[in-house]
Image (cartoon, rainbow, N blue to C red):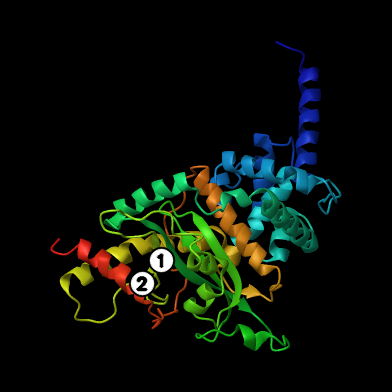
Amino acid sequence: MGPVRGNKKKRKVENKAEEKSLVSGSSEEGSVDWWDVLSRKITGDPSSSHGLEFKYTFKMSRKTFDYICSLVKDHMTAKTHFAFISGNPMSLHDQVALALRRLGSGNSLISIGDSFGTHHSTVSQVTWRFVEAIEEKGLHHLQWPSQQEMTKIKSEFENIRGLPNCCGAIDTTHITMLLTSSDQEADTWLDRKNNHSMILQAIVDPALRFRDIVAGWPGKMNDASVLQSSNVFKQCQKGEKLNRNKISETGIREYIVGDSGFPLLPWLVTPYQGKELSENKAELNERIIATHSVADKALKRLKEGWKMIKGDMWRPDKHKLPRFILVCCILHNIVIDMEDHVFEELPEHDPGYREEICECVDRAGLMLRDKLAMLFSGR
């Protein structure tokens, strides 16, 4: 039996180290103890033997979290060093956890600051530093597909409901805001549901990755207007995108699918309108709707995973908000790229907003849609 005095002395040293860790909210960078300590702090019970589950808290694995830390490390450690109210410095992991909690929970700056043991201004500054870092280092996770990637995407879309040469699905969602009457620009942001909102337009692949996004336009704009104001519209109209290959047997070119709120264009296929449709037109509509559902699901998953942009945001900086939205979309893609399991309980992403009907029809778009309908004639 070893000396009792020595054990007691060792135990005192361990207890002091643990107390110090609980005060600061962190321990060894990247260690298991780091999260054990911080999670108990967030729950408000540092003495508890059980903290929050990591994946439940951040909706990503520890592997993905560590990867994100590696992306932002240089940017987040190069400038001002942040600290807890206790005066203890925040580690890189503490800062990333703080920013992800802010973006993922949608809780207020004060609430998150209280749970982490820091001032709400620190929450704001750390989160913005994180946004800048992801913009700088993570943008390669949100890019238009290469030719090789597009070949795979087309095959995966065709596997959904048989649409050949389909390259993406496009949809929009509203990021709602709470603006005060003192805001001189408040009326600019009023949408058709009488909410203040900002629109996010996204083109999505079959794996629910965002391949192109547009954020920043007022919610009063309709889907067609947002599309026509975007770079992707200009590029597609010029043939710089969605013009690589035609199917030789049918002449069907590359295109994306949208709902009835979008215009029918040479590279954008929307459903036929009307109740009494021919069998092949009705069949094509079903296939378009089923294929387009990936965009709807991606936006649901985005808002469920990054709740800062799900609820009514209190007086956000409207110049910074598009950058927050972009970063949430990049993080959404990173989780997919890292092959993380994602929670499947997905509520509506735009509750209360009824589908719009766009009357804009391009002749070449009509011809493309009719060619697609003929493919399914008699099936």
Q: Quadrant of residue 115?
A: bottom right
**Residue shown at the point (71%, 72%) measured from the top left:** 317
Q: Quarter of the image for the N terminus: give it.
A: top right
Name the side, left or right, on which 192 lies relative to 161.
Answer: right
Q: Farthest residue in the top direction? A: 1
Say above or below: 245 vs 67: below
Q: Quarter of the image for the C terminus: give it.
A: bottom left
**Residue shown at the point (69%, 89%) measured from the top left:** 181
Q: Identify the residue position indicated by label 2 in the image.
A: 365
Report x, y in % for residue 123.
75, 59
Q: Which mark is residue 27?
A: none
Q: Secondary structure at mark 1?
A: loop
Residue 59 visible from this viewpoint: no
Residue kind at label 2, given as amino acid type: Gly
Residue kind at label 1, given as amino acid type: Trp
Report x, y in % for residue 263.
41, 76
Residue nearest the observer in this picture, 234 or 318: 234
Say above or below: 147 vs 6: below
CB under 8 Å between callouts 2 and 1? yes
Q: Which mark is residue 267?
A: 1
Q: Quadrant of residue 377?
A: bottom left
Number of other residues with Cα within 10 Å of mark 2, as a class: few under 14, some 14 to 19, many 20 or more: some
Number of other residues with Cα within 10 Å of mark 1, as a class: few under 14, some 14 to 19, many 20 or more: many
Residue 326 visible from this viewpoint: yes
Instruction: Give the mark nearer the N terminus: 2 vs 1.
Output: 1
